[in-house]
């Protein structure tokens, strides 16, 4: 039997005894610390430390996290598409974009095959940077039963999807596509029409719930989280869409498109399935009665717990302000005229005072005139508030200042909204104050107020002769000089007097000047999107 290898000599034995003694002392100290009772504190709130265990032990290198020391990211991960799947779905997206199908039946067959391949991978596709656009196209081209099938796949995940950079676009498209189907299902149908509708996808039964119930179920998933979703860069767009859908607002209306637009619209209208009759989304839609109750509840939930100071801060918030605009629009147009008198309404939370003399409300409104974001909210407010409310604001804060406001680049857009609501007498009086600013506005090519004055004056039957004289004086009496000033060609002539700008071909710079003068739209608040 082999013998144990040992070091020879007394020094080796002494060293071994010292090491054993040291280990024994360390073990005894550790055992004492573990069994020692903590000293009782006078404070009753004292809590003894809790012994924590984990799979890696509680050694010297283990540092436990304190409560709330680090936020827990509970965002689910739905997985990634493999390379073959990405290639297939990318080719499918290109095929749909080219739209070179011989007939509608071939296109329908192709869409069905793509949906079959996507079955079980819907959430992966929606969250994919390269394939989320394909999911948007599929949603836009799906039949009602296929759309309900997709709703079933998204159900239970809406809270996370609406905050996702790419999946949020798919959620918006899903709700927008559901809106006309809700209107279609609201109308009474014959038994023959009901029998034509599909009830299975890939052999699996589709939800028998009406589309309205599926939309309401999705909204219920978001309840309790409105406070932070209001200013979430992606979810805020979905909130706007849901408010307009519940209100039955036309979704293709120019003003409503500006409210919900978040990216360049995909050209999918020509690819949409026409297998089932649906009302145009440009028309005001019929919605079930339950939608009105859901709309009122959603508005109340959105502002519950938010004080007036926070709401006013949202007015100039680049993400929260557009949501506030939709809230005001829907509240003032769909919940009755008495809503503006309710102290818990959005408008009364923003402007609680019945008189604006030396109040916080006056300071708040005055700050909105010149703010690029807040001025849009003020436009919405002045456009939809009841007449009595509008007159109070106009007489207190606008009537005497309308000339100087017209001269300002931002406030002039608010003035345009004001002119739309003035009577004939008030319009004539406002014109007198604005006329003195016409030369300055012409010089700076700020013609939106002048254009609105002409349109409203013609509609109201006011005397536009003073305005015509002011324009003639500002642009010049001689036709050639007037044309050059309208086209902003005077500066080009000053740079090179030898050249006659009117005889030379119009350059790209001149085209840019013409565009800026007559056709430049206001910059809309859109979410930045790289997808």
Image: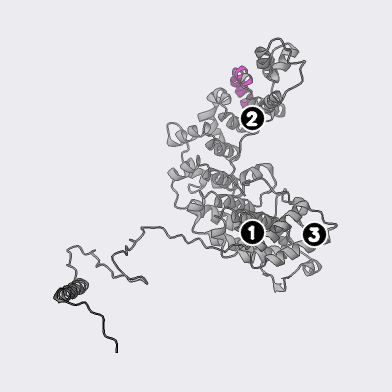
Residue 17 in picture, x, y percent from top left: 16, 76
- Closer to us: mark 1 or mark 2? 1
Residue holding disc 2:
423
Secondary element at tag 2: loop
As drawn, the label of residue 289 is 1
Q: Are marks 1 and 2 in contact (CB under 8 Å)?
A: no
Residue lying at 50% horizontally and 30% vertically, measured from the top left: 396
- Of pointers 3 and 1, the one earlier in the residue sequence: 3
* C-alpha gap between disc 3 and disc 2: 55 Å
As drawn, the label of residue 107 is 3
Q: Main secondary structure of the magenta part?
A: helix
Query: Quadrant location of the N terminus?
Result: bottom left
Residues in magenta?
A: 426-442
- Closer to us: mark 3 or mark 1? 3
Q: Is residue 371 magenta?
A: no
Q: Is residue 313 above or below residue 14?
A: above
- Closer to us: mark 3 or mark 2? 3
């Amino acid at each position: 039997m082999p013998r144990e290898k040992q070091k020879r000599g007394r020094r080796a034995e002494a060293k071994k005894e010292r090491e054993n003694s040291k280990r024994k002392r360390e073990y005894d100290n550790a055992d004492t610390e573990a069994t020692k009772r903590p000293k009782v504190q006078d404070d009753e709130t004292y809590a003894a430390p809790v012994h924590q265990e984990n799979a890696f032990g509680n050694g010297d290198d283990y540092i436990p996290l304190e409560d709330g020391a680090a936020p827990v990211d509970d965002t689910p991960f739905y997985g990634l598409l493999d390379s073959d799947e990405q290639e297939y779905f990318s080719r499918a997206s290109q095929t749909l974009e080219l739209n070179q199908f011989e007939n509608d039946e071939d296109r329908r067959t192709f869409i069905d095959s793509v949906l079959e391949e996507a079955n079980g991978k819907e959430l992966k596709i929606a969250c994919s940077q390269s394939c989320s656009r394909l999911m948007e196209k599929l949603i836009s081209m799906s039949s009602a039963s296929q759309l309900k099938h997709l709703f079933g796949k998204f159900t239970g995940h809406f809270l996370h999807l609406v905050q996702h950079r790419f999946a949020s676009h798919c959620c918006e498209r899903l709700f927008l596509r559901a809106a006309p189907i809700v209107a279609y299902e609201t109308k009474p149908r014959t038994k023959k029409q009901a029998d034509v509708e599909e009830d299975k996808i890939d052999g699996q039964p589709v939800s028998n719930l009406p589309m309205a119930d599926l939309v309401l179920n999705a909204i219920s998933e978001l309840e309790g989280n409105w406070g932070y979703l209001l200013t979430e860069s992606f979810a805020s767009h979905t909130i706007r869409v849901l408010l307009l859908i519940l209100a039955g607002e036309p979704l293709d209306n120019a003003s409503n498109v500006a409210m919900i637009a978040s990216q360049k619209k995909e050209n999918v209208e020509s690819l949409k399935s026409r297998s089932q009759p649906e009302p145009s989304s440009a028309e005001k839609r019929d919605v079930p009665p339950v939608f009105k109750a859901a709309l009122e509840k959603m508005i109340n939930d959105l502002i519950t717990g938010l004080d007036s100071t926070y709401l006013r801060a949202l007015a100039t918030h680049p993400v929260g302000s557009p949501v506030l605009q939709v809230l005001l629009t829907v509240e003032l147009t769909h919940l009755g005229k008495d809503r503006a008198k309710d102290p818990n309404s959005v408008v009364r939370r923003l402007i609680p005072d019945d008189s604006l003399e030396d109040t916080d409300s006056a300071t708040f409104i005055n700050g909105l005139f010149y703010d690029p974001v807040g001025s849009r909210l003020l436009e919405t407010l002045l456009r939809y508030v009841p007449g009595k409310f509008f007159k109070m604001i106009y007489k207190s804060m606008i009537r005497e200042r309308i000339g100087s406001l017209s001269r300002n680049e931002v406030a002039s857009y608010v003035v345009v909204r004001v002119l739309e609501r003035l009577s004939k007498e008030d319009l004539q009086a406002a014109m007198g104050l604005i006329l003195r600013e016409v030369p300055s506005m012409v010089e700076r090519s700020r013609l939106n107020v002048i254009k609105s004055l002409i349109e409203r004056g013609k509609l109201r039957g006011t005397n536009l002769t003073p305005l015509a004289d002011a324009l003639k004086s500002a642009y010049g009496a001689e036709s050639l000089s007037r044309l050059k000033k309208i086209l902003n060609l005077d500066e080009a002539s000053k740079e090179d007097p030898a050249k006659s700008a009117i005889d030379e071909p119009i350059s790209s710079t001149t085209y840019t000047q013409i565009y800026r003068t007559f056709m430049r739209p206001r910059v809309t608040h859109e979410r930045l999107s790289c997808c």
